């Protein structure tokens, strides 16, 4: 039973690996996956969070995209903010 | 029923956590209790950047509805990741067997 038969199996195979998680409000997380459930609630460790903020320069009307990063040791993520989860990049 | 994270948070009761809400408010405090919806009762609360939320100053004892939570920062020393991963595998293995039985 090593074949993938349901979408969640992809995430099961990513346990104990670093995953990429895209969340609502322009947030991205990269961290090691330790737990998840059917709601996509998750526990990640060594997390790097990147938040994208878009600001408009009032004088020039230029759109400036600011990226802010922070690190968290251990983080619980509530499933309803998750947009997508991607397993670590493999050579396959 | 999803008991994995409910059980997990029960093991973290009386530990310090930081709860980030969907409106960007961050509350730190001691986890007093949790229920099946992951509603959280937090004690000794302090607000991160209180200057933005003067109306919330002085709150010490807070119930947070589970659905408004975005993240919860956990004390990494208090989390047994091996136990968590075993529990996750077990929970998802059980789901598989249930499906087989129904089929």
Image (tube, coloured by chain):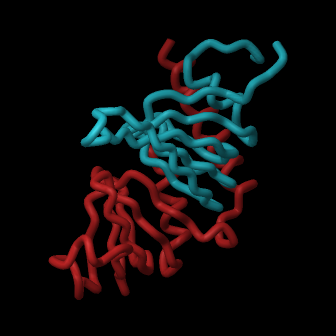
Chain colours: A cyan, B red
Residue A25 sits in quarter: top left
Of the pair A1 and B43, the residue shown nearer to us: B43
Residue A72: x, y in percent?
Answer: 60, 59
Residue B1: x, y in percent?
Answer: 41, 42
Rendered view: B62 above or below A88: below
Of the pair A27 and A57, the residue shown nearer to us: A57
Residue B54 sits in quarter: bottom left
Residue B62: x, y in percent?
Answer: 27, 76
Task: Please report the residue visible at 30 percent of the width from the left and 35 percent of the height from the top.
Answer: A60
Extreme residue toward the front, this view = A59
Of the pair A37 and B102, the residue shown nearer to us: A37
Rendered view: B17 above or below B103: below
Query: As drawn, is B71 to the left or to the right of A59?
Result: right
Task: Please report the residue visible at 43 percent of the width from the left and 47 percent of the height from the top.
Answer: A78
Rendered view: B45 above or below B101: below
Rendered view: B58 above or below B75: below
Query: As drawn, is B95 to the left or to the right of A15?
Result: left
Of the pair A48 and B73, the residue shown nearer to us: A48
Task: Please report the residue visible at 28 percent of the width from the left and 86 percent of the height from the top.
Answer: B60
Residue B68: x, y in percent?
Answer: 28, 53
Q: Is residue A80 visible?
A: no
Extreme residue toward the left, this view = B55
Extreme residue toward the right, this view = A91
Total number of numbered discs in the rendering: 0
Task: Please report the residue visible at 36 percent of the width from the left and 81 percent of the height from the top.
Answer: B46
Q: Is residue B20 visible?
A: yes
């Amino acid at each position: 039973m090593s074949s993938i038969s349901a979408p969640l199996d992809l995430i099961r195979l990513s346990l104990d690996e670093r995953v990429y998680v895209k969340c609502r409000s322009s947030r991205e997380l990269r961290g090691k996956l330790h737990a998840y459930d059917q709601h996509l609630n998750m526990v990640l460790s060594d997390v790097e969070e990147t938040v994208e903020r878009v600001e408009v320069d009032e004088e020039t009307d230029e759109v400036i995209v600011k990226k802010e990063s922070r690190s968290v040791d251990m983080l619980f993520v509530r499933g309803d903010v998750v947009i997508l989860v991607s397993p670590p990049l493999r050579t396959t | 029923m999803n008991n994995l994270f409910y059980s997990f948070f029960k093991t973290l009761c009386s530990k310090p956590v930081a709860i980030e809400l969907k409106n960007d408010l961050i509350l730190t405090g001691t986890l007093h209790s949790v229920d099946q919806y992951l509603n959280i009762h937090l004690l000794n609360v302090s607000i991160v950047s209180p200057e933005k939320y003067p109306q919330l100053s002085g709150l010490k004892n807070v119930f947070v509805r589970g659905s408004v939570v975005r993240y919860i920062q956990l004390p990494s020393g208090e989390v047994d990741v091996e136990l968590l991963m075993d529990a996750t595998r077990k929970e998802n293995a059980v789901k598989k067997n249930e499906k087989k039985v129904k089929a």
